[in-house]
Amino acid sequence: MAFLRWQGASVADAADCVQEAMIQAYVRWSTIRDPHAWCRLVASRRYAHRCASLEEPVADTDNAGSPLLAANTDWDAFEQRHQILRVLEQLPLRQRQVMAWTYDGCTPTEIAETLVMTPEAVRSSLLKARKKLKILLEGEGVV
């Protein structure tokens, strides 16, 4: 879910997309070569499909008491992640995507293969995203 949140998905959308990806993984498990990358790619595509759908998005509901939030949540870390998510939402979609894959531990080459880009284009998007994030985070007082 965090992977999709880095891309701008709401908690509810991320949960739905991840569940749909897990269902597809269960059905196709014997043919999946790299489950880590496959699940992220499928969930990411589900989210992109959701964004492109003609349905009107429903406003985020209050997540207090949601089973998606554990009782022992570190609220300081939670708030910091949400502050960063608000900043990431200001990046163009492609930059958010490459940042999400990078945060998830993928190399530019792996990202390029998954997103059907050149490694140079991935590096360029990362460079632009990092520069913009630095400026935005300094403005938020995070850096």
Image (cartoon, grey):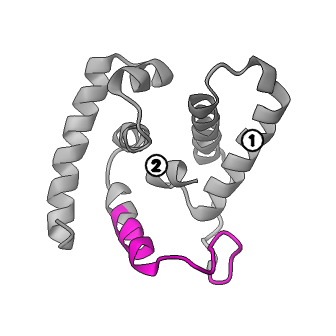
Q: What amino acid type should be assigned to the residue bearing mark 1?
A: Met
Q: Name the mark on residue 7.
A: 2
* Disc 2 element: loop
Q: What amino acid type should be assigned to the residue bearing mark 2?
A: Gln
- Name the residue: 66% across, 69% down: 68
Q: Identify the image quadrant of residue 45.
A: top right
Residue 17 placement (x, y as % from top left): 68, 48
Q: Quadrant of the C terminus?
A: bottom left
> In 3D space, how far apart are the residues under numbered discs 1 and 2 (Cα atoms)?
18 Å
Residue 72 placement (x, y as % from top left): 58, 79
Magenta extent? 64-84
Q: Which residue is more in the foreground, 64 or 30?
A: 30
Closest to the camera, between mark 1 and mark 2, is: 1
Numbered circles on residues, count = 2
Q: Which residue is mark 1?
A: 22
- Name the residue: 17% across, 55% down: 134
Residue 109 placement (x, y as % from top left): 36, 20
Q: Name the mark on residue 39.
A: none
Residue 41 placement (x, y as % from top left): 58, 32
Q: In the rendered structure, does residue 21 fall within the stretch colored magenta?
A: no
Residue 56 visible in the picture: no
23 over 57 or under it: above or below: above
